[in-house]
Image (tube, rainbow, N blue to C red):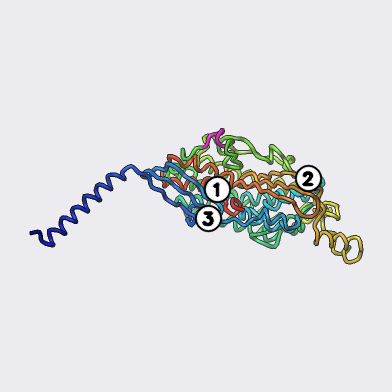
Amino acid sequence: MATVQDIEIRDSAARAAQAAEELQDVQGDKMVLNMGPSHPATHGVLRIVLELDGEIITKADPDVGYLHRGDEKIAENMTYTQFIPYTDRLDYLAPLANNVAYALAVEKLLGIEKDLPPRCQYIRVMCAELARISAHLLGLGAFAMDMGAVTVFLLTFTEREKIYNLAEAVSGARFTTSYTRIGGLMRDLPPTWLDQCRKFCDEFIPALDEVEVLLTRNRIWVDRVRGLAAISKSDAIDYGLSGPNLRGSGVEWDLRKNQPYLCYPDLEFDIPVGAVGDCYDRYLVRMEEMRQSVRILRQCIAKIPGGAENQTKEPINVANGKVVLPPKQKVLTRMEELIHQFMLVTEGMNCPPGEIYFGHENPKGELGFYINSKGGGTPYRMKIRSPSFVNLSIIPKIFTGCLISDTVAILGSLDFVMGECDR
C-alpha cells in the first residue's frame, strides 16, 4: 500500500514531467514586451510594443497619443494671436523656432510675408538658430547619457543654460517664450544682447570641440552606433522623414535652402549630409548643423540693420495697424488706433478666406502649418505637421532585426519630442 510520501513523490514527478513538456512546447515562441510609456530611453510617453525572439526584435509597433492635448482643435476657438503660446508647447526644446514657424504661416495667409522689415527677419533667424542649437544640445546630451557618457550631458546642458539666458533677455521667459508676433516681434533686442550672443558663439565652439573629442572617435561610442539602424535614401523619402534624420541618409534637403524664407538667401551656410544613414551619421549631421548655426548667427550679428541698439530706428513690425497692435501712445490719444486695438484684441485680425501651408526647417525637421480660413480672426481648420510624429513612423522598419539593447541608441539618434508628436 502506497504511503502519503510515495503519493507526493509521484505527484511531484508528474508535475516536473508536465512542466518539462510545456517548456519544450514553448521553445522558439516569441515574447511580447512593452517598452514605455514610462521609460527613460523613450524620451517622453512613447510606448513601443516589441515582439522578441530571444534578444532579436522581430516586430516593433509604436503607440503614440499619451500626450495628446488637442492643439489643432483649440486653434479653431482662438484668434491667431492667442494661439502663439500654444506653439511653445509643441517642440518645447525650441519654442522660439515654433513661434517663428507659426507666425510665418499666418503671415503667408495674410499675404504680408514679403513686407516683414529686414531687422525683424534677422532677429527671427537668430532666434531660430539659437533654438536649433539648444534642441540639438539636449538631443545629443540625452543620446550620450543613454549610452553611458554622462560627462557629455553635463557639457551640453552648460551651453544650453547660456541660450536660456539669451532667451530670457529677449523675451522675459526662459522656456515658453511667446516672443514672435503676427507681423513682427514682441519687442526689439536689448542693447547688449548681440554682444552676449557673440560671446556665446565664441565660447560654444570650444565646448563643442570637447564633446567631439569625447565621442566622435571614442571606440565604445563608435562601436555602439556605427552601422546601426541604417536608413536608405529611398526609405527616408518614402517614410516622409525630414531634418537631420533625412539628411543623415544622404538627402540634401533643407527648407532654408530649397524653399528659402526670411533673410536666409542673404546668408552663407552649408547643409551637412550623411553617407550611410546610420545612427552615427545622424549624430555627425547634428554636430555639424550646430557649427553651421553658429556661422549663421555670426553673419546676422554683423549684418543686422540698425546694429545692437538700433540707432537708425529700424522697424521690427509691419506697418499695418490692422495686423499689428498700434503704439500705446496713439491708442491713448487717437480714436482710430483705439478702435484697431479693440478689434485686434477682441476679434483678431481679419484674415482672408483661403488655405495655405507653410513649412519651416525646425531642429527636428519640417514643422508645417496648414491653415484653412473662411475669413475673420480665427482659423476654420488647422493642421500641424509635426516632424517627430512622421519621423517615428520609420521605427517598425529599422527596429526589426536589431537587438533589444539597440533600441536605446536608435531612439536617441532619431531625436524626437512627444509633446510635438502627440500635439
Would residue 413 be seen by someone viewing this image from the given angle?
yes
**Residue 203 part of the magenta-drawn span:** no
Q: Residue furthest left?
A: 1
Horizontal arrangement in the rendering, residue 98 relative to residue 308 (left or right): left
Horizontal arrangement in the rendering, residue 159 relative to residue 347 (left or right): left
Q: Which residue is denoted by mark 1 in the rendering? A: 415
Of the numbered discs 1 and 2, the one sitting upstream in the chain is 2
The prevailing secondary structure element of the residues shown in magenta is helix
- Residue 222 drawn at (x, y percent): 45, 42
Depth check: give the residue in front, 204 or 38: 38
Rendered residue at 85%/59% (across/down): 326
Task: Identify the image quadrant of residue 162.
Answer: bottom right
Q: Which residue is denoted by mark 2 in the rendering? A: 354
Give the label on residue 258, or none.
Answer: none
Mark nearest the camera among 3 and 1 is 3
Q: Are marks 3 and 1 in contact (CB under 8 Å)?
A: no
- Residue 333 drawn at (x, y percent): 91, 66
Rate crowding at label 2 as few (under 14), some (14 to 19) or many (20 or more) other CA atoms within 10 Å: some
Q: Are marks 1 and 2 in contact (CB under 8 Å)?
A: no
